[in-house]
Image: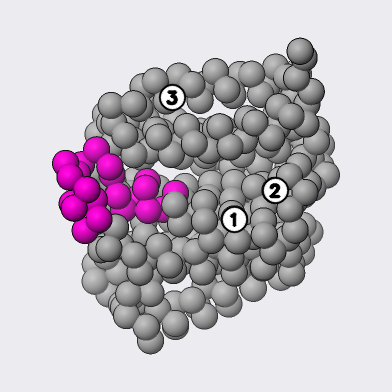
Amino acid sequence: MAINRDTFIKLIIPSLIGVSLIITIIDELRTIGILFFAVGSIAWFLFLIKKIEFLTHDEESDRLLKWFVYPATLLNIFFIITNKSYRDSGTGWVYLILSIFTILIYLTPEFKKNIVGIDKKITKGIFWGVGGAFVFLIIAKILPGFSLLTPELPFSLLQGVRGIIIIFFAPVLEESLFRSSLLHIFQTSYGLSFTTSNILQGGVIFPAFHGLAYGILLSSYKTLIELFGATQAIAGSLVVAGVYGIIAGLLIKRFNSILVVIIMHIIINAIIFFTLSVGTFFSIG
Protein backbone atom coordinates (compact mmCIF):
# COMPACT_ATOMS: atom_id res chain seq x y z
CA MET A 1 0.00 0.00 0.00
CA ALA A 2 1.45 3.35 -1.04
CA ILE A 3 1.99 5.88 1.71
CA ASN A 4 0.66 9.38 1.07
CA ARG A 5 2.50 12.62 1.79
CA ASP A 6 0.50 13.56 4.90
CA THR A 7 1.09 10.18 6.51
CA PHE A 8 4.78 10.30 5.64
CA ILE A 9 5.11 13.74 7.25
CA LYS A 10 3.37 12.59 10.42
CA LEU A 11 5.69 9.58 10.67
CA ILE A 12 9.04 11.07 9.63
CA ILE A 13 9.06 14.09 11.99
CA PRO A 14 8.73 12.18 15.32
CA SER A 15 11.07 9.50 13.95
CA LEU A 16 13.83 12.00 13.19
CA ILE A 17 13.30 13.77 16.53
CA GLY A 18 13.72 10.42 18.31
CA VAL A 19 16.82 9.50 16.32
CA SER A 20 18.26 12.97 16.96
CA LEU A 21 17.99 12.49 20.72
CA ILE A 22 19.60 9.05 20.49
CA ILE A 23 22.53 10.53 18.59
CA THR A 24 23.03 13.22 21.22
CA ILE A 25 22.97 11.01 24.30
CA ILE A 26 24.20 7.49 23.53
CA ASP A 27 27.77 7.29 22.23
CA GLU A 28 27.51 3.60 21.34
CA LEU A 29 24.52 4.23 19.07
CA ARG A 30 25.75 7.48 17.54
CA THR A 31 27.07 5.95 14.31
CA ILE A 32 23.96 3.91 13.59
CA GLY A 33 21.79 6.86 14.66
CA ILE A 34 23.56 9.15 12.18
CA LEU A 35 23.04 6.49 9.51
CA PHE A 36 19.32 6.26 10.23
CA PHE A 37 19.03 10.06 10.27
CA ALA A 38 20.82 10.25 6.91
CA VAL A 39 18.50 7.61 5.41
CA GLY A 40 15.44 9.39 6.82
CA SER A 41 16.64 12.74 5.47
CA ILE A 42 17.25 11.29 2.01
CA ALA A 43 13.80 9.68 2.07
CA TRP A 44 12.30 13.02 3.11
CA PHE A 45 14.05 14.76 0.24
CA LEU A 46 13.06 12.17 -2.38
CA PHE A 47 9.46 11.85 -1.21
CA LEU A 48 8.56 15.44 -0.31
CA ILE A 49 10.98 17.87 -1.98
CA LYS A 50 12.15 15.97 -5.09
CA LYS A 51 14.24 18.78 -6.58
CA ILE A 52 17.49 20.38 -5.49
CA GLU A 53 16.99 23.95 -4.34
CA PHE A 54 18.55 26.02 -1.60
CA LEU A 55 15.96 28.75 -1.14
CA THR A 56 12.20 28.78 -0.64
CA HIS A 57 11.48 31.79 -2.90
CA ASP A 58 9.74 33.34 0.08
CA GLU A 59 11.53 36.55 1.07
CA GLU A 60 11.08 36.16 4.83
CA SER A 61 12.10 32.51 4.98
CA ASP A 62 15.07 33.06 2.68
CA ARG A 63 16.38 35.83 4.94
CA LEU A 64 16.60 33.33 7.80
CA LEU A 65 18.30 30.71 5.63
CA LYS A 66 20.82 33.12 4.06
CA TRP A 67 21.59 35.23 7.12
CA PHE A 68 21.65 32.57 9.81
CA VAL A 69 20.95 28.91 9.02
CA TYR A 70 23.32 28.33 6.08
CA PRO A 71 26.28 30.27 7.59
CA ALA A 72 25.88 28.38 10.89
CA THR A 73 25.60 25.06 9.06
CA LEU A 74 28.69 25.60 6.89
CA LEU A 75 30.79 26.85 9.79
CA ASN A 76 29.69 23.90 11.91
CA ILE A 77 30.68 21.45 9.15
CA PHE A 78 34.06 23.18 8.97
CA PHE A 79 34.59 22.72 12.72
CA ILE A 80 33.51 19.05 12.53
CA ILE A 81 36.00 18.36 9.74
CA THR A 82 38.92 20.27 11.21
CA ASN A 83 38.58 19.64 14.96
CA LYS A 84 38.67 16.06 16.23
CA SER A 85 37.70 16.89 19.82
CA TYR A 86 34.66 18.82 18.64
CA ARG A 87 33.73 15.98 16.30
CA ASP A 88 34.17 13.32 19.00
CA SER A 89 32.20 15.29 21.61
CA GLY A 90 29.02 14.87 19.58
CA THR A 91 28.06 18.54 19.85
CA GLY A 92 28.87 19.20 16.20
CA TRP A 93 26.63 16.32 15.15
CA VAL A 94 23.80 17.74 17.26
CA TYR A 95 23.94 21.04 15.41
CA LEU A 96 24.37 19.41 12.02
CA ILE A 97 21.22 17.40 12.67
CA LEU A 98 19.31 20.50 13.78
CA SER A 99 20.38 22.39 10.66
CA ILE A 100 19.51 19.54 8.26
CA PHE A 101 16.16 19.10 9.99
CA THR A 102 15.44 22.82 9.68
CA ILE A 103 16.50 23.07 6.03
CA LEU A 104 14.36 20.05 5.07
CA ILE A 105 11.34 21.61 6.77
CA TYR A 106 11.86 24.98 5.08
CA LEU A 107 12.19 23.44 1.62
CA THR A 108 9.14 21.17 1.95
CA PRO A 109 6.21 22.62 -0.09
CA GLU A 110 3.62 21.79 2.59
CA PHE A 111 5.43 23.94 5.15
CA LYS A 112 6.66 26.91 3.13
CA LYS A 113 3.60 29.08 3.68
CA ASN A 114 3.29 28.35 7.40
CA ILE A 115 6.77 28.60 8.90
CA VAL A 116 8.02 31.93 10.21
CA GLY A 117 11.02 33.75 8.78
CA ILE A 118 12.40 37.27 9.22
CA ASP A 119 10.08 40.07 8.15
CA LYS A 120 11.09 43.50 6.86
CA LYS A 121 10.86 45.16 10.28
CA ILE A 122 14.48 44.34 11.13
CA THR A 123 15.02 47.19 13.59
CA LYS A 124 11.82 46.35 15.46
CA GLY A 125 12.85 42.70 15.70
CA ILE A 126 16.27 43.61 17.09
CA PHE A 127 14.75 46.09 19.57
CA TRP A 128 12.29 43.60 21.05
CA GLY A 129 14.90 40.84 21.01
CA VAL A 130 17.30 42.99 23.05
CA GLY A 131 14.48 44.00 25.40
CA GLY A 132 13.37 40.40 25.93
CA ALA A 133 16.93 39.28 26.65
CA PHE A 134 17.50 41.87 29.33
CA VAL A 135 14.17 41.11 31.00
CA PHE A 136 15.29 37.46 31.14
CA LEU A 137 18.69 38.45 32.54
CA ILE A 138 17.19 40.73 35.19
CA ILE A 139 14.99 37.85 36.34
CA ALA A 140 18.09 35.63 36.36
CA LYS A 141 19.82 38.16 38.59
CA ILE A 142 16.92 38.18 41.03
CA LEU A 143 16.27 34.42 41.05
CA PRO A 144 19.37 32.25 41.65
CA GLY A 145 19.56 29.30 39.28
CA PHE A 146 17.34 30.93 36.66
CA SER A 147 19.52 30.23 33.63
CA LEU A 148 19.61 28.26 30.39
CA LEU A 149 21.99 25.37 29.82
CA THR A 150 24.73 25.87 27.25
CA PRO A 151 26.39 23.18 25.10
CA GLU A 152 28.94 20.85 26.67
CA LEU A 153 32.13 21.52 24.70
CA PRO A 154 35.67 20.09 24.87
CA PHE A 155 38.10 22.27 26.83
CA SER A 156 40.61 21.81 24.02
CA LEU A 157 38.55 24.08 21.77
CA LEU A 158 39.81 27.62 21.40
CA GLN A 159 37.79 30.13 23.40
CA GLY A 160 36.76 31.93 20.24
CA VAL A 161 35.42 28.73 18.71
CA ARG A 162 33.50 27.94 21.90
CA GLY A 163 32.02 31.42 21.76
CA ILE A 164 30.85 31.00 18.16
CA ILE A 165 29.17 27.70 19.01
CA ILE A 166 27.42 28.94 22.14
CA ILE A 167 26.55 32.45 20.96
CA PHE A 168 25.75 31.73 17.29
CA PHE A 169 25.11 28.03 16.55
CA ALA A 170 22.88 27.28 19.53
CA PRO A 171 20.46 30.24 19.28
CA VAL A 172 20.16 30.19 15.48
CA LEU A 173 19.63 26.46 15.02
CA GLU A 174 17.47 25.92 18.09
CA GLU A 175 15.13 28.82 17.36
CA SER A 176 14.94 27.95 13.65
CA LEU A 177 13.88 24.38 14.40
CA PHE A 178 11.78 24.63 17.56
CA ARG A 179 10.07 28.00 17.24
CA SER A 180 10.07 28.70 13.51
CA SER A 181 9.47 25.14 12.30
CA LEU A 182 8.05 22.62 14.78
CA LEU A 183 5.67 25.09 16.42
CA HIS A 184 3.85 25.59 13.11
CA ILE A 185 4.15 22.01 11.86
CA PHE A 186 2.33 20.73 14.95
CA GLN A 187 -0.53 23.07 14.10
CA THR A 188 -0.73 22.48 10.34
CA SER A 189 0.20 18.80 10.02
CA TYR A 190 -1.11 17.40 13.30
CA GLY A 191 -4.08 19.71 13.79
CA LEU A 192 -3.03 20.83 17.27
CA SER A 193 -4.00 24.20 18.72
CA PHE A 194 -1.37 26.91 19.13
CA THR A 195 -1.37 26.46 22.91
CA THR A 196 -0.86 22.70 22.70
CA SER A 197 1.79 23.06 19.98
CA ASN A 198 3.62 25.70 21.99
CA ILE A 199 3.64 23.61 25.15
CA LEU A 200 4.82 20.58 23.15
CA GLN A 201 7.70 22.33 21.36
CA GLY A 202 8.70 24.71 24.16
CA GLY A 203 7.68 22.95 27.35
CA VAL A 204 8.45 19.34 26.41
CA ILE A 205 10.77 18.81 23.42
CA PHE A 206 12.99 21.85 23.96
CA PRO A 207 13.74 21.05 27.65
CA ALA A 208 14.22 17.38 26.75
CA PHE A 209 16.72 18.34 24.09
CA HIS A 210 18.53 20.66 26.50
CA GLY A 211 18.58 18.09 29.25
CA LEU A 212 19.72 15.19 27.13
CA ALA A 213 22.09 16.97 24.79
CA TYR A 214 23.56 19.52 27.19
CA GLY A 215 23.16 18.24 30.70
CA ILE A 216 22.65 14.48 30.94
CA LEU A 217 24.84 12.26 28.79
CA LEU A 218 23.26 8.88 29.49
CA SER A 219 26.34 6.93 28.49
CA SER A 220 28.29 8.69 31.27
CA TYR A 221 26.22 7.16 34.06
CA LYS A 222 26.43 3.55 35.13
CA THR A 223 23.40 3.35 37.42
CA LEU A 224 19.90 4.79 37.63
CA ILE A 225 20.88 6.49 40.89
CA GLU A 226 23.67 8.40 39.13
CA LEU A 227 21.28 9.33 36.32
CA PHE A 228 18.64 10.48 38.81
CA GLY A 229 21.24 12.60 40.61
CA ALA A 230 22.34 14.19 37.34
CA THR A 231 18.72 14.96 36.47
CA GLN A 232 18.14 16.61 39.83
CA ALA A 233 21.28 18.71 39.41
CA ILE A 234 19.95 20.41 36.29
CA ALA A 235 16.21 20.24 37.08
CA GLY A 236 16.02 23.99 37.61
CA SER A 237 17.62 24.68 34.24
CA LEU A 238 15.17 22.29 32.56
CA VAL A 239 12.24 24.20 34.06
CA VAL A 240 13.76 27.47 32.89
CA ALA A 241 14.28 26.02 29.40
CA GLY A 242 10.60 25.06 29.31
CA VAL A 243 9.47 28.50 30.46
CA TYR A 244 11.79 30.16 27.96
CA GLY A 245 10.61 27.90 25.11
CA ILE A 246 6.95 28.68 25.75
CA ILE A 247 7.57 32.43 26.06
CA ALA A 248 9.63 32.38 22.84
CA GLY A 249 6.70 30.67 21.10
CA LEU A 250 4.35 33.40 22.33
CA LEU A 251 6.76 36.06 21.01
CA ILE A 252 6.77 34.34 17.62
CA LYS A 253 2.98 34.52 17.55
CA ARG A 254 3.00 38.16 18.66
CA PHE A 255 5.64 39.46 16.22
CA ASN A 256 5.47 36.83 13.44
CA SER A 257 9.25 37.06 13.06
CA ILE A 258 11.95 34.64 14.19
CA LEU A 259 14.47 37.50 14.48
CA VAL A 260 13.09 38.59 17.86
CA VAL A 261 13.80 35.26 19.57
CA ILE A 262 17.11 34.69 17.75
CA ILE A 263 18.44 38.05 18.97
CA MET A 264 17.08 37.39 22.46
CA HIS A 265 18.68 33.94 22.61
CA ILE A 266 22.01 35.21 21.21
CA ILE A 267 22.25 37.91 23.89
CA ILE A 268 21.32 35.52 26.72
CA ASN A 269 23.90 32.96 25.60
CA ALA A 270 26.52 35.67 25.09
CA ILE A 271 26.06 36.95 28.64
CA ILE A 272 26.23 33.40 30.04
CA PHE A 273 29.32 32.64 27.96
CA PHE A 274 31.22 35.75 29.03
CA THR A 275 30.15 35.30 32.65
CA LEU A 276 31.42 31.72 32.72
CA SER A 277 34.57 32.65 30.79
CA VAL A 278 35.77 35.70 32.65
CA GLY A 279 33.41 35.92 35.60
CA THR A 280 32.42 39.48 34.85
CA PHE A 281 29.91 41.55 32.86
CA PHE A 282 26.78 39.98 34.31
CA SER A 283 26.69 37.35 37.03
CA ILE A 284 23.89 34.86 36.40
CA GLY A 285 22.38 33.60 39.65
Quarter of the figure with the C terminus? bottom left
Magenta residue span: 209-229
* Position of residue 91 measured from the top left corner of the image (x, y, whole percent): 36, 40
Element marked by disc 2: helix
Residue 244 coordinates in the image, percent (x, y): 52, 67
Q: Residues within 10 Å of mark 1 (few under 14, many from 20)?
A: many
Label located before the other in sequence (3 or 1): 3
Identify which residue, 202 or 108, lies in the foreground.
Answer: 202
Mark 2 residue type? Phe
Q: CA distance from mark 2 to mark 1?
A: 9 Å
Q: Is residue 234 above or below residue 173?
A: below
Vertical relation: 55 (above or below) 275:
above
Residue 232 appearing in the image: yes
Observer-nearest of 56 and 198: 198
Q: Earlier in the sequence, mark 3 or mark 2?
A: 3
Q: Is residue 59 at least partly visible in the picture?
A: no
Q: Which residue is mark 3?
A: 34
Q: Which residue is mark 1?
A: 200
- Nearest the eye: 199 or 266: 199
Identify the residue under disc 2: 186
> Are the residues at dot 3 and dot 1 in contact (C-beta closer than 8 Å)?
no
Q: Residue at x 43, y 24 (%)?
A: 34
